Amino acid sequence: MPDELTEVQVEPQAVTTPAPEIETIEGEPFDAARAMRTIEKLRAEIKELKPKAKQAEELSLAEKKRREAEMTELEKLTAELQKAQAELKTAQLSQLKKDIAIRVELPLIFADRLHGETAEELEADAKKILEALPKAPKPPPVNPMSPGAGASQKETVDQQRARVYGTGFSPLDPEYAKAHGGGIVWPEPKNP
């Protein structure tokens, strides 16, 4: 086979006057008409491909249902067992995370953020998180001279009443009557 040159026929394109250069992309002037033709061409392709994509999706679902129908009872039970084991593992890991958080005194809200598969890995991660959390300041010690930060330094209602109105007296109080005179004083009974 000798090398032969083949002629390629090229369809002549309509000559259009170039639009004024608005913006260049990679050195080519922007042509609005050409861009619109390209957009219309892509829209037409999308219209053609949408039904094909939907049909392919339906075929995929149908194939999945067919495979499930063909599965033997043993395969179905095996699949269910694997799913149940995965759920059990997830639940056990979640409980382990909560237990570790309680053990290292990490707030339970951070339990889900722990990473690791074993108790040692989870505990190490919990300790790292606990170290990163800001520490609450310790309250000052409470003693009679320093009642503490939460103690009230104000007067009680009874103290305020005594300060404003003075201390009251009862005319029936025998001690008051003896001290100030007056009132009724009953003699104390004598024991035989």
Image (tube, rainbow, N blue to C red):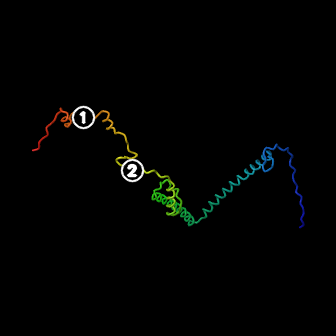
| Residue 5 falls in image quadrant | bottom right
Badge 2: residue crowd in 10 Å (few <14, some 14–19, many ≥20)? few
Q: Position of residue 32 (x, y in %)?
A: 79, 45
Which image quarter holds the N terminus? bottom right
Q: Camera-side residue: 76 or 143?
A: 143
Which image quarter holds the C terminus? top left
Q: Residue furthest front?
A: 145
**Three-letter amino acid code at the position of disc 1:** Phe
Cβ atoms at labels 1 and 2 below 8 Å apart: no
| Residue 82 falls in image quadrant | bottom right
Q: Camera-side residue: 31 or 107?
A: 107
Q: Position of residue 56 (x, y in %)?
A: 68, 57
Position of 192 with respect to 45 (left or right) is left
Disc 1 is placed on an element classified as: loop
Residue 141: assigned label = 2
Q: Which residue is drawn at the image coordinates 90% and 63% (left, top)?
A: 4
Disc 2 is placed on an element classified as: loop
Q: Where is residue 6 in the image (x, y as percent from the top left)?
A: 89, 60
Label 1: which residue? 169
Tell me how far mark 1 sits from mark 2, CA to CA. 40 Å
Q: Camera-side residue: 39 or 140?
A: 140
Q: Counting residues from the N terminus, which is met first, the one under dot 1 or under dot 2?
A: 2
Q: Camera-side residue: 187 or 92?
A: 187
Position of 172 with respect to 125 (left or right) is left
